[in-house]
Structure formats: structure tokens, C-alpha cells
Amino acid sequence: MKRIELAPHGPELSRMVYGTWRLLDTKPTPQEINRRLHACLDLGITTIDTAEIYGLYEVEQLLGAALALSPGLRDKLELVTKAGIYVPCSHHPERRTAHYNATGPRLIKSLEQSLRLLGTDHVDLFLIHRPDWLTRADDTAAGLNELLRTGKIRAAGASNYSASQIDLLNAQMEQPLVTNQIEFHLLHPEPINDGTLHQCEKLGVRPMAWSPLAGGRLFDLSHPAAPRLAAAAKSMSSRYNGATLEQLAYAWILAHPSHPLPVIGTNKLERLQSAAQADAIVLEREDWYALWEAAQGRKIP
């Protein structure tokens, strides 16, 4: 697995990232998660992505318990977490309405809670999970700058931000943002044209791509694009040592010149292994466009 510097002033991460959004789907034990983290290491996937809200605020604690089973394991990994989304749930019955909060004090409180749950004194990357429509950028930046100064986070970034929102927040940062984690896949190629990926190139930062398989819709034959993608992948598979549609979908993201880092969301070891193999695929230009055509159901403009 290749490693990639997220930004000139940012951390080095594995080119593909293990995401924990669906970690609780199979109700795993800490021991099972520990084995999965070791499997990631064996594949060269050293970057683990999580968030305060994942599993309705339960995933970070499970990850922390899994890390604690192997002394030294945390030091072999890069931990990424996010904050800023707050919803009513059993852990927070006092909340009436789901809302965003990216005020500086709230971000600091959330990150400090994440550190306690994960059992670490810092995270390698901390992201604002969603833009907060009611908070000024200088307020958000004040919290991030404080966390950077204290060393509780080694780098800061955003998630689901537009290019203009990144510009505004960056203008208040003492240390520039190192990434924008966005939805980007064959069924959602909009970041190519909305300025998001262009901005990443301009700033010299690498985006992170969540839901790289479109939440499984690439393989759902009830979706109109799925049969077209299956046929396209079958036609080109032999040129890539029998690569599957899943692997070609990852390779499609990796091929973009902004060098995105796909965030893998599976709980199955064989799917992790398959995804890791996509790192070696270099799509030919015409095949990249052929997959785009199949996904969109039309030829390029």
C-alpha cells in the first residue's frame, strides 16, 4: 500500500483509509475489531477514520477498547476523527433537534471526549464533520487553532465543505487545513466540476472520498447504472488482471489528479483485501471515461 502526504504541512497517511461508519452493523466485540485493525496493518492500511457521531456516539469507545488490547497498536496507526453533528439519542435525551455546532468551545469539548474514548493523547487529523450554518469561521478556527497549539490534534481539515467554505475557514487558520473529506464516486462525480477538487489541487492538499462504492448502489441491479457498470467492468477486467467492478471503482477515484484517498467502509476482511489490491491498478484514460459513461448513462459533453 502506497503512502501519501496529505499536504506539504500535513500528515502522511495510507493511500486507502479504513472507515468505521458501519462498524457496529455486525455487533463486533473489541477482540474482533482488534483483529480487523491488525488485518488493516498487514495490508498497509494504517489510517483509521471515525467520528464522534458514528454508531450514535458509540464507535469511538469500541475502537478505544480494541486499541487497548494491543499495547503499541495505536502508535502504528493514524487516527482521524470528526465532530460537529449532534442528534437526539439515548446518550443525549436532552437534545430536541438534530443540529450542527462548529463553535470553538464545542469542538474542543468534543475532541477531548474523543481522546478519552479512543485512549490516546492526540489524533493525527481532526475534521469538522459538516458546515455549521450559524457559526462564524473565526469562531470555528479559534477552536481548531487551540487544539493545534496544544498538540491534541496534529492537523485539521473539513468534511463536506464547499470550496468557498474552505477558503473562508482557511483565512482564519494559523495552520492551513490539510484535506476536505467529501462524497466522491462513480454515481456522484460532482466534485470534479463544482470546484472542490480543483481547489484541492490548487492548495496542494489531498481530498478524502467517503462512500467510494456509493453505499453499495454500484452493485444493486435495481439501480439503472448498475447493469451498465457491470458490463463495462467485464469488458475491461482482463486488462487489469481480472479486476472486479469494486476494484475498478476504487481505481477510478484514485486516478483523479487531485489524488483522493478512498475511505473503505466494509466490515469484511475479504473486501478489505480486495480494496487494497486496487491501489496497484492504473486505469487507462479511455477506461476511466468508459466507467464514467456507464455510471452516467450518457457520453461526455
Image: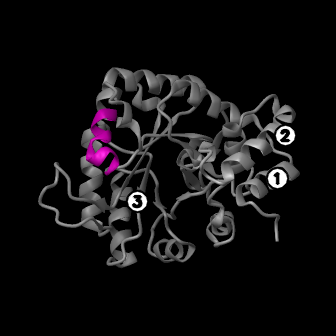
Q: Which residue is mark 1?
A: 290
Q: Is residue 264 visible?
A: yes
User: What secondary structure is marked by label 2?
Assistant: helix
Q: Position of residue 113 (x, y in %)?
A: 24, 48
Q: Earlier in the sequence, mark 2 or mark 3?
A: 3
Q: Which residue is mark 2?
A: 235
Identify the residue shown where x is 35% and y is 36%. Answer: 24
Q: CA distance from mark 1 to mark 2?
A: 10 Å
For the C terminus, the image quarter is bottom right
Q: Dividing the picture into quarters, in which one does residue 108 lie?
A: bottom left
Q: CA distance from mark 2 to mark 3?
A: 38 Å
Residue 111 part of the magenta-drawn span: no
Label 1: how many residues lie within 10 Å, few (<14), some (14-19) or many (20+)?
some
Identify the residue shown where x is 72% and y is 34%. Answer: 244
Q: Main secondary structure of the magenta part?
A: helix
Residue 60 part of the magenta-drawn span: yes
Q: Which residues are magenta?
A: 53-63
User: What secondary structure is marked by label 3?
Assistant: loop
> Closest to the observer: 188 or 175?
188
User: What secondary structure is marked by label 1?
Assistant: helix
Q: Residue furthest left?
A: 94
Label 2: how many residues lie within 10 Å, few (<14), some (14-19) or many (20+)?
few
Q: Residue furthest front?
A: 222
The reply to whether discs 1 and 2 touch (Cβ–Cβ < 8 Å) is: yes
Mark 1: amino acid: Ala
Q: Which residue is mark 3?
A: 129
